[in-house]
Amino acid sequence: MRYEGDIFSPHIAGEDYILQCTIGCSHNQCTFCGMYKTKAYRVRDLKEILEDIDQAQMHYGDIEKVFLADGDALTMSKEDLIIILDKLYKVFPGLNYVGTYATARSILNKTISELIELRNHGLIEAHLGVESGDREILQQIRKGVTYEEMVEAGRKLKKAGIELFATIILGLAGRTPKTVDHVTNTACICNDIQPDYLGVLTVIIEPRTELFTQYQNGNFQIPLNIEIVQEMHSLLKDLNLENCGFTSIHPSNPVYIEGMLPQDKDMLLETLTCIIEKRDISLLRPRAAERV
C-alpha cells in the first residue's frame, strides 16, 4: 500500500481502510483548509490503485469499511470508480461500506444516472463540506459554489440513493455580528438539503491558509468556546431535519453531543442550554473550559 503525503479522512472513518485514489483536492482554494496545500491535485494510476487493494487484502485480510481518499475521489471517471468498487467488494467479502469525500462541483459534474450506477456498485456514502449557508461567507471562504449549487449537489446525491454526510463549520464569521447570518442561513441550507447525517465542526486556524494570514493580521478573531456553544444552540434550534443523525464529536468542538433529529432535539438543546445559562463547564470537553 502506497500513500503520498498526509492522509485525511472523516473523524468517524478513523478505523476504516483508507484507499488513496486521488492526490490532493480538486478545488483546494478554501481559505480555512490546510489539508492539501502541499499537494498538487491528480488522479492516481488505476493500475496502482488496484495493486494497493491486493496489498491491503494480504495485510489486513477481510475488512468491512473502506474510505476513498484524498479530498475528492468522486472526480474520477464513473468507469474507473466502478472498477475500483467492484474490485473492493470482490477482494473483501465482508465489505459493507465504501465512503468518499465529495465536492459540490464533482457531484454536479456527474449525471444522476452515473451516481445511481456508483450506488449500485457499492458507493454507500459521500461526505460533503457545506460549511455555511450564508452566501457572503461562501464567497469569502472561496467555496467555489453558490448556495443553490450546494443544495442541488446534496439533493442529487440523496436522489441517487447515496447517503449524504454533510458538515458545517461554526465560527466562520469570527467574533462579528455576521455570526447571526452564518448560523441562521446554515440551518436554512441544511433544511433545504435534508442530509442523512450532519456533522458540526468548529473553525480551526491552520498554518498555510489564508484564514491564518487574516488571523495574524488581526482581521479574524477566534470565537470563545462559549460563543461556539451558543452558535451550536442557535443552529440546532433552527434545524428542521427528518431522520438525520446529528453529531459534534469532531475534536475541534468544545462540546460533544449527538443524537437523531428530530426526536433527540430537545435533549440536545437542554445540554447546550445548561452550558450557556448555568456556565456548567463540566459538560465541555477536556481543556475547552480554558477559553470560555
Image (cartoon, rainbow, N blue to C red):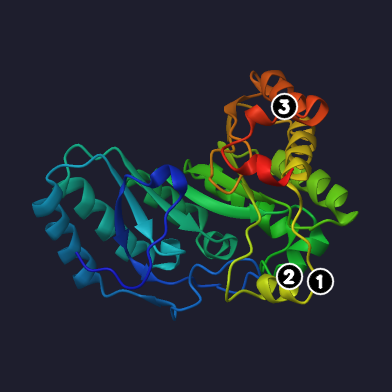
Q: Amino acid at mark 2?
A: Tyr
Q: Amino acid at mark 1?
A: Asn
Q: Nearer the viewer, residue 280 or 12?
A: 280
Residue 36 location, x and y as percent? 48, 72
Whichever of callouts 3 and 2 sits on the residue coming sooner in the sequence is 2
In which image quadrant can residue 212 be found?
bottom right
Please tell me whether mark 3 or mark 1 is closer to you in this view. 3
Residue 52 location, x and y as percent? 19, 63
Relative placement, left or right, of 148 versus 198 is: right
Q: Which residue is mark 3?
A: 280
Disc 3 to disc 1, C-alpha distance: 31 Å
Relative placement, left or right, of 74 versus 49 is: right
Q: Residue at x 20, y 37 (%)?
A: 94
281 above or below 160? above
Residue 239 location, x and y as percent? 74, 33
Q: Residue at x 50, y 50 (%)?
A: 127
Q: Which residue is mark 2?
A: 215
Taking the view exactly as shown, the residue that stands out farthest to the right is 177
Residue 5 location, x and y as percent? 35, 72
Element class at badge 2: helix
Whichever of callouts 3 and 1 sits on the residue coming sooner in the sequence is 1
In which image quadrant can residue 177 be found?
bottom right
